[in-house]
Amino acid sequence: MPRLISERSYDDITYKAEGGRKDSSGSFSPFTFLCISLVLTLMGLVSLYSASYAKAVDLGLPHYWFFMRQAIVAAVSLAVGAVFTLIPRSALERGYLLFIPLSLALLVLQLIPGFSYGTSLVIGGYRIIQAPSVALLGIIFTVSCLLPEKDEAERRGLKIVLSSLFTALLLVLSLLAGGISWYLLSSVLTLLLLRRRSVGKIPLLLVLLFMLVTGGALPMLFPTLLSPLFSSVLPVSDPSLYDAALTASVNAIADGGIAGLGLGSSVYKLGVLPSPESQFIFSVFVEELGLAGASFVVLMFVLFLIIGIRTSKRGMGMEREKSASLAFGLTLMVVLKALCNMLYVSGLLPLPGILMPFFSYSLSEEAMTILSSVMLYRLVYMMGREAHEAS
């Protein structure tokens, strides 16, 4: 028998609010969000195999080497992430107790000579993780969950001091460990999160001033922090200003045209692009599937963004400020990473080093992306259920 309206799931795109009016500020259904995340993950794995098999063979490895490792990490991350779907919202909001010390420890360790290679933390000769990427989670949980709400009186002053101190430390260490690319991404995310938490204009201006001073002073002491800006310069119309890798990336995208050359038919992955499986995987993807494939990926990330923002808006309407801010931050972290990578490989944004979520080969980044998506899924589910029960 068909279910009664009162028994239907809260997963509808719109839901009935007080007075019978429709309020579309809620999230799409958790199932829709899950499908989008799985589509991006599967597309990323297929694209990774296509972009990496030639490089794997050249290195004397099995043709599926990059793909298989990434697929295993994705499967394990999904299994571990299933645990997050069982924890209550209050426990998720206390995630700063894990991510703040973890972020600080990884950033400090990466600054020790012998423990870093580029923007990655290296232990025993193996690249373990990009510490600045983990620091983004630390910033999200610090601003979203450690910063007190307006009506929160208990230890309010202490929480404000601690959240300000930890955020400043994470920003400075991200600049030292990751360079200007990660610092700018972290700064933009921090400002947007503070705005979501309704921080006043004066504190917001002070934070912005701190970011400008830090971003200007530290590169004067350590000029290498600005080196990524000098390796790729605007405008796009003059390819001679680019290094060889970025020039090849732009040309690969141009050669893709509307429909692309076909899956597996990329030419630039055959020794022209230095890292077709990681930094420039989106260039290979567009070369093979063209503007049509790129548009579909962009659409998936736009839907990912819409779901996260609507979930955050629903949480704010329910006065779940911390959960709402957490959903906002997790959403922006994934989408801004994707945007930075797509703009960089297209020659529009001189900020290298940020990998494409769901696509680029990086075991740590794949795990972080999936776990972040699982946490966001949990918030989508809980916000929808609580709103349905309250209506």
Image (cartoon, rainbow, N blue to C red):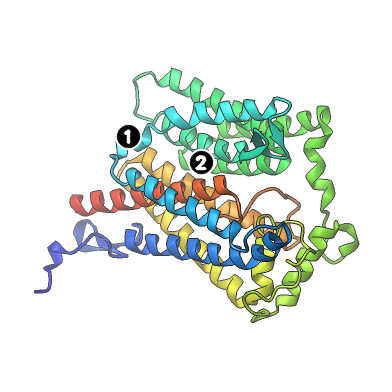
**Vertical placement of residue 356 versus 192, above or below:** below
Q: For this view, does 28 lie left or right of residue 3?
A: right
Q: Name the residue that disc number 1 marks.
A: 91
Q: Give the CA separation, mark 1 to mark 2.
A: 20 Å
Q: Is mark 2 on a helix, strand or loop?
A: helix
Give the percent coordinates (x, y) of residue 114.
72, 28
Return the disc, 1 or 2, that comes first in the chain's sequence. 1
* Mark 1 or mark 2, whichever is nearer to me: 1
Q: Nearer the viewer, residue 213 or 86?
A: 86
At 80% from the left and 65% from the top, the residue drawn is: 248
Based on the displayed image, in which of its 4 quarters is residue 340 positioned?
bottom right
Neighbour tally class for label 2: few under 14, some 14-19, many 20 plus, Cα within 10 Å: many
Position of the C terminus by quadrant: bottom left
Based on the displayed image, in which of its 4 quarters is residue 58 positioned?
bottom right
Q: Does residue 29 appear in this view? A: no
Q: For this view, does 58 lie left or right of residue 307?
A: right
Q: Which of 384 and 127 is in front in this view?
A: 127
At 38% from the left and 60% from the top, the residue drawn is: 34
**Vertical placement of residue 90 versus 104, above or below:** below
Give the percent coordinates (x, y) of residue 203.
56, 30
Give the number of the disc on residue 223: none
Q: Residue furthest left?
A: 1
Give the percent coordinates (x, y) of residue 293.
59, 74
At 67% from the left and 60% from the top, the residue drawn is: 56
Marks counted in the figure total 2
The amino acid type found where label 1 is placed reads: Ala
Position of the N terminus by quadrant: bottom left
Neighbour tally class for label 1: few under 14, some 14-19, many 20 plus, Cα within 10 Å: few
At 55% from the left and 38% from the top, the residue drawn is: 134
The amino acid type found where label 2 is placed reads: Leu
Give the number of the disc on residue 193: 2
